[in-house]
Structure formats: structure tokens, C-alpha cells
Image: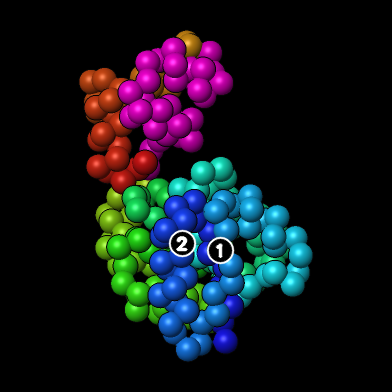
Amino acid sequence: MISISIADDEALIASSLATLLSLEPDLDVRPTAGSGEELIETWADPSNRTDVCVLDLQLGGIDGIDTATRLMETTPDLAVLIVTSHARPRQLKRALAAGVLGFLPKTSTADEFATAIRTVHAGRRYIDPELAAMTISAGESPLTNREEEVLELAGQGLSAEEIAVAAHLAPGTTRNYLSQAMTKVGAQNRFEAFTRARELGWL
């Protein structure tokens, strides 16, 4: 029997996934968590630990990848499956670098989820084929972490001054990062740069 923990800040999705997986004879779903912090707190008690963790990428507090990293500090052989509504190549690369074995869109079927859980439990990777192909075609991003950060904020419609505050940077430094990012993606303004970087799979 494979024991499973689920963390998703959308309670309906978490309970629906738990119900579907519980129908499988070899899967045992434990109580779900509404955040990464809640799961980490529960994980402190060894009796609450499971074989596999299914984590939503976009959790309300720390995200699924950071949650996985924290859990694997105490449980190095933990199998983690990240699920998301907005899969991007950059996120997949980050997850793989963190030691995550599985990555699936939330639109996957119940059979795909069950297969993915069994696969990562066996120590093998299970990656959504479409996202894997997108990641390969995206190639290496020329953007630095800071340039990615300011572009993500630009994509929210923030002004350069608002981006500076959110990123804890000086306004001049922020403009430099935005300018460098715009040059690298061949864009005329910061929002176009954000859009093109997303299309290229770099954000």
C-alpha cells in the first residue's frame, strides 16, 4: 500500500483528488493539507509521514517546490509529484533541480495521477509529455534570476517603481534589469518582454 499526502490550497480540488485516488486498491490517502506550511508542520511528527507527497505548485504561502525541498531535508528518499494549472518549462526545470520526480497538469485523468504516483514511488520520473517537449524546445533561458523576477512582476501590470518596491530593489537597478531583459528577448517594453519570455518558456 502506497501512503499519500496531498497539499492544495483549493479544498475542493484536494478532496476530489483524494476521493479519486482512494478508489485505487493500492493507494492510501491521508488527510490533506491546505498549505505547504501546514504539511511541513504535520511532517514534523514521523508518524504522519507518507511514501508520496502530491503538492500543488501554486500554494498560498511557500510554493510546492519549496515545500518539497523542506520535506526532503528530513526525508531524503521522499517521492514528490507536483501538480499545477499553469505548467511552464522554467517551473519544471526548477522542480527537477530540487529532486522532484513527478510533474503533472491538474487536467490529467485519475488514471494518469495514479500511474504517476506509482511511478515516482518506484523511484522513476513521471513528467507530462507535452510539458517535457515544451521544455526541450524552450532551450536555456538567457535571463538571470533577478531579470525573471522583475519580468514576472511586470506581467502583473506593475510600474517600474512598484516593481522596485516588490523586489526590494532600487528604482535605478530595477530599470537596468528590465532594460537588460527587454534586450535579451527583443522587446520594446516590459510587458512585451514578459509576454515573449512566457511564450519562449523562460518564465
Asked if residue 189 lies left or right of residue 112, the reply is left
Residue 188 drawn in magenta: no
Find the magenta span and give its range: 141-170
Q: Is residue 91 above or below residue 166?
A: below
Front residue of 199 and 52: 52
- Local packing at callout 1 (Cα closer than 10 Å; few below 14, some 14-19, many 20+) is many
Seen at 47% across and 89% down, the residue is 25
Q: Residues within 10 Å of mark 2 (few under 14, many from 20)?
A: many
* Marks 1 & 2, CB-CB < 8 Å contact: yes
Answer whether residue 102 is visible to the viewer in this image.
no
Residue 154 among those drawn in magenta: yes
At label 2, which amino acid type do we have? Ala
| Residue occupied by mark 1 | 32
Looking at the picture, does residue 75 appear above or below residue 197? below
Q: Could you say which quadrant of the image residue 44 lies in? A: bottom right
60 lies left or right of 175: right
- Residue nearer the viewer, 133 or 69: 69
Q: Which residue is mark 2?
A: 14
Which secondary structure, mark 2? Answer: helix
**Placement of the N terminus among the 4 image quadrants:** bottom right
Q: Which mark is residue 184?
A: none
- Picture residue at 25% right of the left edge, 35% below the top: 196
Q: Secondary structure at mark 1?
A: loop
As measured in the structure, the alpha-carbon distance from the residue carrying label 1 to the one carrying label 2 is 7 Å
Q: What kind of secondary structure does the magenta stretch mostly adopt?
A: helix
Q: Tell me, yes or no, if residue 6 can be seen here.
A: yes
Please state which amino acid type lies under the numbered disc 1.
Answer: Thr
Q: Nearer the viewer, residue 180 or 45?
A: 45
**In percent of the image, x 59 and y 78: which residue is there?**
3
